[in-house]
Image: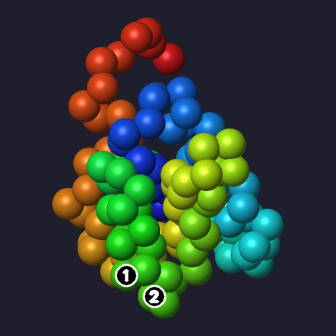
Amino acid sequence: MVVITRSDISPGYQAVQSTHSVADFSYEYPEIFRKWKEDTNSIICLDVKNESELLKLYDKLKGETQSVLFFEPDVNEYTSMCIYGTHEIRKKLNSLPLLLKNKQRHGTI
């Protein structure tokens, strides 16, 4: 599973929006979600700069794998997407940074 969220929203909002896109993916593709859980259970969280980049990436990948684009009505914008991350898809995304990689940490797990 690959979750891609905008980096131009706050870290807390990124977490919420990422979670929304995974929840929507599990609803839209329950069989694929079950396969993912049984096969890998791996989640990769990446980011893009803004809504425009998110939409471009979604348009590029939506025909290649199961995908969900999450629209947040509270801000009237698309904020996150979740896609089934095949090996080929993950290779296409290897230039994207990890979510929150460039943000200052405010604590430890």
Q: Is residue 7 visible?
A: yes
Q: Is residue 65 above or below residue 99?
A: below
* Mark 1 surroundings within 10 Å by alpha-carbon count, few (fewer than 14), some (14 through 19), many (20 or more): few
* Furthest residue toward top: 107
Residue 98: horizontal and vertical position, in percent? Answer: 32, 45
Q: Amino acid at mark 2?
A: Glu
Q: Is residue 34 visible?
A: no
Mark number for residue 60? 1
Residue at 37 percent of width and 39 percent of height? 8
> SS class of the residue under badge 2?
loop
Q: Is residue 5 left or right of residue 88?
A: right
Q: In whole angstroms, how far apart are the C-alphas of marks 1 and 2?
A: 8 Å
Q: Is residue 60 left or right of residue 71?
A: left
Mark number for residue 64? 2
* Cβ atoms under marks 1 and 2 closer than 8 Å: yes
Q: Amino acid at mark 1?
A: Lys
Residue 66: horizontal and vertical position, in percent? Answer: 58, 80
* Furthest residue toward left: 95
Residue at 53 percent of width and 69 percent of height? 83
Q: How are the colours assigned in the image? A: rainbow
Q: Is residue 91 above or below residue 16?
A: below
Residue at 55 percent of width and 33 percent of height? 13
Residue 108: horizontal and vertical position, in percent? Answer: 44, 13
Q: Is residue 32 left or right of residue 100?
A: right
Choose top left, top right, bottom left or bottom right for residue 7: top left
Residue at 54 percent of width and 57 percent of height? 78
